[in-house]
Image (spheres, grey):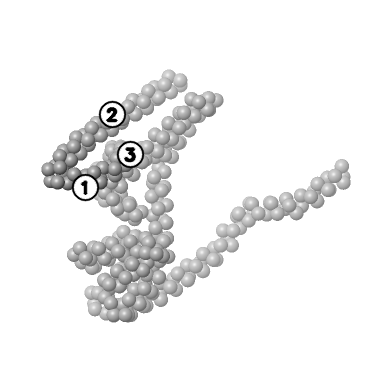
Amino acid sequence: MENGFLIFILLLITISLFLFGFYLSAKSYKGKREFRERLGQINAGMERLYEEKEPLKRKGIIVNFIGSLGRILAPKKEGNISEMRRLFIKAGYRKSNALPLFFGLKIMLALSLFGAIIVGKLFFWQWITSEQFTYISIFLTLLGFYLPNLWIKLRISSRKEKIQRGIPDALDLMVVCVEAGTGLDAALNRTAEEMKKTNGVLADELSLVNLEIRAGKPKQEALKNLAWRTDLEDLSNLTTLLIQTERFGTSISQALRVHSDFMRTKRFQRAEEMAQKMPIKLLFPLALFILPMFFMVTLGPAFFIFIKYFK
């Protein structure tokens, strides 16, 4: 078992040296490329712009290193890449380097936790046996590898909840804007500006719809993209309503007012449902934490008096 442990350590050191050599080669190639870009910028009279961007490039060395590691595990098929990008868009990460950074972070966390257990074994926890060390190292490595997945799921859930809370208020603002005589595009723009202080996530999504429409994308496609990015049933119903209203030429203000009343009623029903679930959720912490302390405080002195009296 000890020989196997030494082989495992040597294998880890070999992999680490290989990754470090890959990083150095990538850094050398990047330096040559930046040197050529700098020569081109000097020839074009862009030396001042390069000097302004240079500190930002230095700060991105760690990010580039994590991204270079992530490209090793990043999916190569276009279908898998599209599905992962949609997952990142739902979480609010729209940059092109989100995919390699995600997988690079998985590798870094797995190696960091594995290195932490090795340091603990060598300096602090010598009493741990080789079998226990193997099990703990496998568990921590898998934990570090899957922690980014858990973070993405929590991020998506948080964004959905924020957008869900802001939909009724956004609908009320849109109704006011449309009834004041503005068009749907102007109503979306005004709603996005007003929602920035109260619900920045929903305001960003509505602003992105306005940017797509200004860029020349059809309004129906921009609204469908909104439902695709958020993956919420309420927004999907709203976009379907707006598309059908735009297609058949019916009154947008009347449709938005009816849908706003429906969303307000739905939010009230959701709050009532949460209130009805609250006593059941409070039952377990009440029975496990509050009642034992209550009996200890109230009956504890009487118990000791009882023991002292019969002793």
SS of the residue under disc 3: helix
SS of the residue under disc 1: helix
Residue beneath label 2, please? Answer: 21
Residue beneath label 3, please? Answer: 62
Quadrant for the C terminus in the image? top right
In the image, 240 versus 222, the foreground residue is 222
Q: CA distance from mark 3 to mark 1?
A: 23 Å
Residue 89: give x, y in percent of width and height: 31, 54
SS of the residue under disc 2: helix
Tell me the residue at 73%/52% (across/down). Answer: 297
Tell me the residue at 59%/62% (across/down). Answer: 279
Residue 4: image tag? none
Residue 49: image tag? 1
Tell me the residue at 48%/70% (across/down). Answer: 269
Residue type, mark 1 in image: Leu
Residue 104: give x, y in percent of width and height: 33, 40
Tell which tag, 1 or 2, sits nearer the viewer.
Answer: 1
Q: Residue furthest top?
A: 3
Q: Earlier in the sequence, mark 3 or mark 1?
A: 1
Q: CA distance from mark 3 to mark 2?
A: 15 Å
- Does 66 sit above or below residue 289? above
Residue 73: give x, y in percent of width and height: 30, 39
Q: CA distance from mark 1 to mark 2?
A: 32 Å
Camera sees residue 236: no
Which of the 4 image quadrants contains residue 227? bottom left
